[in-house]
Amino acid sequence: MAPPAGQIRPGRYLAIFALIVVALYALVFFTGDGKPHPKLGIDLQGGTRVTLTARTPTLQPPTNESLDQARQIIETRVNGMGISGSEVTRDGTNLVITVPGEGGEQAKQLGQTAELAFRKVVNAVPATPPPAGTTPQAVPQQQGPGDQQRAIEEAKALRQSTDPNVQMQALQALNCAAEDPLRGNDDPKLPLVTCDREGQQKYLLEPVFLEGKEIANAQAAPPNPQAGEPGWTVNLDFKSAGAKTWADFTSANVGQQAAFVLDTEVVSAPQIQEPLLGGNARINGQFNQQTATDLADILKYGSLPLAFDQSEAETVSATLGVASLEAGLIAGGLGLVLVAVYCLLYYRLLGILTILSLVLSGGVVFGVLVLLGRWVGFTLDLAGVAGFIVAIGITADSFIVFFERLKDEIREGRTFRSAVPRAWLRARRTILSADAVSFLAAAVLYILAVGQVKGFAFTLGMSTVLDLVVVFLVTHPLVAIASKNKFLSKPSVSGLGAVQRLGDQYRAARKAASTTAKEA
């Protein structure tokens, strides 16, 4: 037989909660690495934060579509490199890469445009300082976008000219030690005068005959001294159309050089010994294992639609992260203590139930954090810790709504035992409404926010949901048990003595009014 409305079988609810906790911590201790600790973000365990500033050939603000595409490509590169716990977010026209722990040096290379192109070598000369009286092709310290745009246009006019005389002048005047204004801004349909990555050779190249988007796969290969490759190389596999173009070019240009140009720099310029009909190519450019692997991964996941300058690379030390975590834990512990003291002074027995519920809620939150870190890579940062601290107030507020409703029922003349089911029915709607509003606010903030604010919104929303679990399965059943216990329901123990005296006065007044009405 079902209990009356508002009344429950508290043992059943507590048993359900106990099963949830047992299942949760069984997953914590017996899955994954079995270590009960959440995954920490960059500001708690240290790491690297890299800010990339986008630039376009016209110096106009980049479009949202190109920024989103660049963010997705960089995010794919991060995942492909196995850097766990990282995040790529937009901040206006900037992209911010955060990498917790190790992997900071790899993160600094993720902003490469990686626009690989294949050009035929027309001429190659050793790189030497520019002759006296010539203007090196560098980007001076620009004071405004107009100066930078003029530098790009002048570099194009000189270094991408179709006039042989101008090409030779550009080849002689080019300063390989200076920053290249054409990086990410060259025209693939025009010839190009440029340097190699080491700044030791200058090249005059024909227009692009094969673009990097025709690459199907790229893979780093270890040294092979027997094949004359003492260093690491990058092996390329072309798509069907690219394989045909490469085969046709190598067949028609045996004995010539083909330059592999990455972001306007020549990575390598091997001589074609024989036709290459297998749809593959090899880049050898004085790589070590790390640089070859980085380049292969970048080429594998595609080139960026924009050029980026690394405007900031911030390294957060682990020591600072530990100090920040300690400060967050102290703030959270202080908040818990203040809430506990307030509840004990104001509610007594009900305050003890509040503290117990908060402790159980914290245990559930911790277990969920550990599993989220393993399953979806969720990292806890300082903003997330702030979300949990705010959630303490939300959880305590649910208890207060229930307890105040309970006191109202007792003031109206009901006993502690009879007031609990009626108070729960009325408080439940308020608790659900308040938590629904909090969760909706957290969800909207998570959708619209960027960066660490998302961590705050996520933990706030998660804590709000778990608050309902604890209130429904723990707090309400414990109060129901206390109301049925002779010792715990004593006014001196429950802390409801003053309220019950008001209730007794209310009942006496109603009884007196009823007697007077009957006599009249």
Image (cartoon, rainbow, N blue to C red):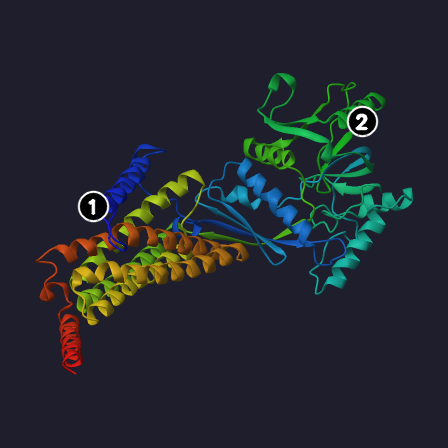
Relative depth, front residue between 287 and 36? 36
* Image x and y of residue 431, in percent: 35, 60
The residue under label 1 is: 11
Quadrant the N terminus occupies: top left
Q: Residues within 10 Å of mark 2 (few under 14, many from 20)?
A: some
Q: Residue furthest top?
A: 226
Q: Between residues 94 and 317, which one lies in front from this camera angle? A: 94
Residue depicted at 14% across the width and 75% down the height: 511
* 225 shown above or below 487: above
Residue 456 visible at all: yes
In the picture provided, is 366 more to the left or to the right than 201? left
Task: Kindly indicate the quadrant of the structure image that contains residue 467.
Answer: bottom left
In which quadrant is the C terminus drawn?
bottom left
Between the residue at mark 1 and the residue at mark 2, the CA separation in whole angstroms equals 75 Å
Nearer the camera: disc 1 or disc 2: 1
Q: Report x, y in % for residue 116.
A: 71, 37
Q: Which residue is mark 2?
A: 245
